[in-house]
Amino acid sequence: MEPTPGSQSGDEEVLNIDFGRYVEAVRKYAWVIAAIVALSVTAAVIYTARQTKVYQATASVQVEPRLPDVLGQGAELLAGGAATGEYYKQQLSVLKSNTLLRATVETYQLQLQLMTDKEREGLPEDTVYQRATERLADMLKVTYPNGDRILYVTVKSPNAKLAADIANDHVAAYFAYSQGLISTTKAADALQKQFENSEKELRDAEAALYKFQKDNDLLAVSIEDKQSLVSSNITSYTARLNDARAHRIELNARLTRMRKAATGDVLDSPVLALSQSTALDTLKASYFEERTKFAELEKEMGPKSPEYQMQKAKVDDLYASLQAEVQRQVGAVNEEYLTAVATETALGGEVDHFKQEALDLGPVLVGYNDLARKKKSAEDKYNILVARLSTNVMTGELNKATDASLVKPLDSALEPTDPVSPKLKVNVAIAAAISLFFGIGLAILLAWLDRSVKSLDDAQAAAGAPVLGMIPMIAEGELAADDDKARDLYVHQHPTHAVSEFCRSLRTNILFSGGDRELKTLVVSSPNQREGKTTTVIYLGTTMAQSGQRVLLVDTDMRRPRLHRSMGVSREKGLSNLIVGEEAFEDVIKSTEIPNLYVLPCGPTPPNPAELLMTKRFAHVLEELKARFDRVILDSPPLQGLTDAVVLSKQTDGALLVVRAGKTLRDEVRRAAREIRSVDGPITGVILNEFDMEDRRYGYYYRYRYNYAYGEDQKEQEASQTA
């Protein structure tokens, strides 16, 4: 079914990938791809040959798990006491450590082989060792691949013997290191040193504590006892101070009342009650007794009697004595009060003294506790090391008794004979694969960038019309390169050639493409110049004339006419004369050497060919030509920049687009078809011109059509000869 114009877009479908095009591109550029691969392989061989050969040597060492601590003293002296993954990871780290690498360098003087004299010149010895160690680290690799207690030391070097020597030297250095590390004698030495340090620390701690006790008077009594004594004194003296303060308060109250009472009458004063003196009581009793006697004498003898006077003096003396005793009692209480105040003050001073002593004891206690803790820590460490040292000595004796050797060099590295790099086969294979992919990618890229029509599908998709046929390329040597006339008459002069057969097939397809619509007038154009448009017109006219039809070829390309030269007629009179009415049809239509084929040349070139073809007179001329001939084929100018073909497509029964394989771009075909359809011109189909018969995309079609048709022609000729 013919594709409809509406089914075509301005651009190609992105997902419509023509794999055949890319496969053919790979076939086409196969020699380029092969050349790229060959060059790449050659370059790989040269590159590999110029690379420094690297040799690899491997030595192995067997590492057994460490003898467990049979004495049951807890943690191992060395980490990894059992055959655990962590233990062998530790051994891997030891083998790869900078310490062991440097030991290998220093022990076996590898800096002389790893560095040149110039590189070592002027450098400090430590720097030389360090740089040699770094180079050794780059050359050496340690692996533990199988988990079978065997570690492998691999060394790569351009010097095969050096690689083997370094691998063996490193294993030997590891063996020596492991003997020094695991030997119980060495461990005992290390423990002995720690023990001596610990013993010194303990002695220093004890001396510091003794000096502190001596400086703070703590030798006879402990800090705890002294702290308890101070606390007890504070408690005791505080209680006594409280009692003295209460007694002073009591005396003060008593003294105050007695002083107040002493100012009144002695006999009525409460001092007598407050006083605890027996003398005051005796005087008071005597006073009242003598006073009673005085009262009786006053009644019996009168105030003038000597007895009265004597008794009165005696009573007065007793009263004075009472007053004096009261004052003496107040003074006594006052003295007692003063004593109580002094006692309270003294007790307060003692309490303050003991409190200050307690405060002064605080820093002493802190210092004492700190020194005591240091002594305790040093003592604990000392005791642990004593036990460990004893255990280690006993374990060492057991190891010696059982000859427990944990690290054993297994296989020595042998001097390699074949290098491990560069690998010629691998490099060549990689170069070949990469270059092959590159070449194929380049071919595909070139095919993708090539927008020309390469296949029937390209032509059909671009034009939106079916491909009616193909005209193959005439082989070089059969025609001169610039002989257009010979090319145009090739079908007439070589009727049995493949080109002729393709043209006859094209003729048949054109006749049947119209269906019920008769295609009497056809316009033939192309997107660009030099795409075989005029040659195709002559081929079509020749094959149609050979079928018995009267065919007229009209040269409507009034800008660059060529039809008259190929057919051997004059162009002095032609189509332009007919259009303007200057000549008759019989005078301008020319016969050719090909039976039934006639030519109407373009005639004099008008200044405005497109306007001339749009006139009613041209339409009348075209109708007259249709009446006179079975087929009228118009050779029009190319569509690039010109509208002649577009105008003619509107006035004919069908338009044929000639596309040159491998030259005409798909966008140009699409643009040409779009211009014709823009005026509703019918596009009958596309003719693929100048295709290569060796192209695999057309090979099957060519072989089938040519062999089949040529056989039929042979049968027809034989039948006609027989008749």
Image (cartoon, grey):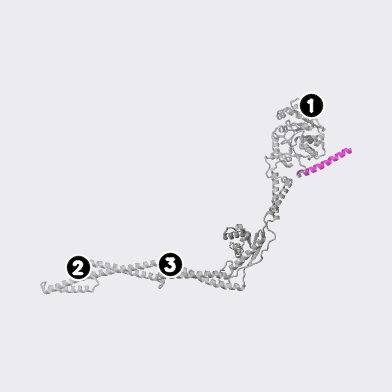
Q: Marks 1 and 2, Cα distance to the nearest angstrom?
A: 193 Å
In the rendered structure, the answer to whether residue 478 lies left or right of residue 337 reads right
Circle nearer the N terminus (1, 2): 2
Q: Amino acid at mark 3?
A: Gly
In this rendering, does residue 81 appear at all? no
Q: Amino acid at mark 1?
A: Asp
Q: Nearer the viewer, residue 6 or 425?
A: 425
Label 2: which secondary element: loop
Magenta segment: 697-723
Q: Indicate which label's residue lies in the foreground, 3 or 2.
A: 3
Residue bearing the label numbered 3: 367
Residue 524: horizontal and vertical position, in percent? 74, 34
Residue 637: horizontal and vertical position, in percent? 73, 33
Q: Nearer the viewer, residue 671 or 84?
A: 84
Q: Indicate which label's residue lies in the foreground, 1 or 3.
A: 3
Magenta stretch contains residue 705: yes
Q: Quadrant of residue 311?
A: bottom left
Q: Quadrant of residue 395?
A: bottom right
Circle nearer the N terminus (1, 3): 3
Q: Tell me, for residue 265, which label it has, or none.
A: 2
Circle nearer the N terminus (3, 2): 2
In this rendering, does residue 705 appear at all? yes
Q: Residues within 10 Å of mark 2 (few under 14, many from 20)?
A: few
Q: Tell me, for residue 587, which label it has, or none.
A: 1
Q: Quadrant of residue 516?
A: top right
